[in-house]
């Protein structure tokens, strides 16, 4: 059963950046809606955003930090 995730726990996984957390959750939710398998057990009626946040909270999904381009 999935429940609402405490923001403090989620922010730890996104290096305390709300912006990064939103990007992580939205990217993972898009992957799930495109058919990628879930990394956590969930009910049939669970929303992809809830599943994505649960995966982030459990450390199954990590932030993809882009490297700066060299000129």
Image (cartoon, grey):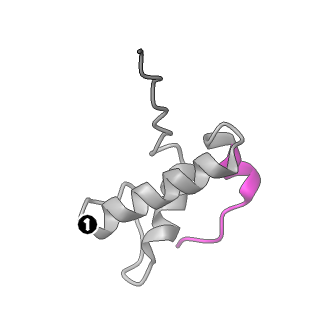
Above or below residue 47? Residue 30 is above
Q: Give me the residue at 33% from left, 64% from top.
A: 32
What residue does disc 1 label?
Answer: 34
Q: Secondary structure at mark 1?
A: loop
Q: How many marks?
A: 1
Q: Give me the residue at 58% from left, 56% from top.
A: 22
Q: Give me the residue at 25% from left, 66% from top.
A: 34
Residue 18 on image: x %, y %: 68, 51
Above or below residue 40? Residue 16 is above
In-image side of 34 versus 70 (left or right): left
Which of the 4 image quadrants contains residue 31?
Answer: bottom left
- Which of these two is toward me, 27 or 70? 70
Residue 62 on image: x %, y %: 48, 40
Q: Which residues are magenta?
A: 1-11
In-image side of 9 versus 1 (left or right): right
In-image side of 37 versus 23 (left or right): left
Q: Residue furthest bottom?
A: 45
């Amino acid at each position: 059963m999935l429940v609402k995730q405490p923001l403090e726990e989620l922010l730890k996984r996104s290096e305390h950046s709300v912006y990064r957390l939103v990007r992580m959750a939205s990217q993972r939710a898009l992957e799930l809606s495109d058919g990628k398998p879930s990394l956590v057990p969930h009910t049939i009626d669970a929303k992809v955003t809830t599943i994505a946040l649960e995966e982030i909270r459990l450390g199954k999904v990590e932030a993809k930090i882009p490297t700066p381009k060299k000129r």
